[in-house]
Amino acid sequence: MVSITRAADLTVVGANGGGWVSVTGTSAPTSPLVQPAAPWEPLGAISDDGLTYGFDEDSQEFTPWGLTSPFRTQITKSVRTFGLTLWETSRVAVQSIMYRIPAAELEPVGGITSFAETASPEPDRRAWWFLVIDGDSARGFYVPQGEVSDRSDVSFKQDEMSGYEITITAYPDSAGNTVYHSDSIPATPPTPGS
């Protein structure tokens, strides 16, 4: 008889989490269980849709003459993205991300924040740290060079929270890596059949 092994502590529910942003070149936090320190800036409240870790890949199949199935596949595109909706739209770091404006230029003067959106935005790469927490488990994603590659429309309605829905595309660092993973998962005792 086959013994089916199941371990609930090896699953992840995105019960809680957060995000932080900093300048490129900022080192990753040392542990997913440690609060990131300056120069990391918190993104604040994220919508209850949580964080989406996206995979966009293309490949080329090679099927030899006389066969109907490929005998080799070559990856031709491999992109990682992170999607989330930022609810704290008055937070300076969040405005800086949405409008591609340095945070120093968004500090209020006399209680008023004023800025203009350019018709010719410059590239705006930053370092990103995302954390997903499920009880005693934590999963961290460090993006050394990422840029907001997509922004949704912003609604201002009586029955809806305004938010900045963004997609961040991860670019390769000097080592050729786009995303670094750091997990803190409780030890699982061995079970029969594992």
Image: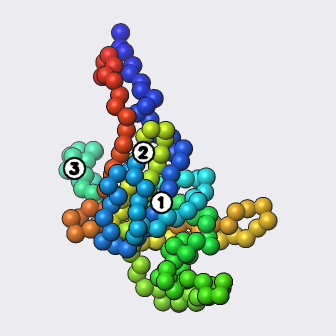
Label 2: which secondary element: strand
Residue lying at 60% horizontally and 84% vertically, measured from the top left: 108
Label 1: which secondary element: strand
| Quadrant in which the N terminus appears | top left
- For the residues marked 3 and 1, what is the alpha-carbon distance in whole angstroms? 39 Å
| Vertical order, 56 against 94 (above or below) | above
Circle 3 residue: 72
| Vertical order, 127 against 29 (above or below) | below
Disc 1 residue type (three-letter): Gly
User: In this rendering, does residue 153 appear at all?
Assistant: no
Which sits earlier in the primary sequence, circle 3 or circle 2? 3
- The one of 64 and 3 positioned closer to us in this rendering: 3
Residue lying at 54% horizontally and 79% vertically, measured from the top left: 99
Which sits earlier in the primary sequence, circle 2 or circle 1? 1
| Vertical order, 150 against 185 (above or below) | below
Disc 2 residue type (three-letter): Ala
Circle 2 residue: 138
Mark 3 vs mark 2, foreground winner is 2
Name of the residue lying farthest toward the top: 1
Residue lying at 58% horizontally and 71% vertically, measured from the top left: 91
Circle 1 residue: 19
Disc 3 residue type (three-letter): Arg
| The quadrant where residue 11 appears | top left
Q: Residues within 10 Å of mark 3 (few under 14, many from 20)?
A: few
Label 3: which secondary element: strand
Residue lying at 35% horizontally and 45% vertically, measured from the top left: 183
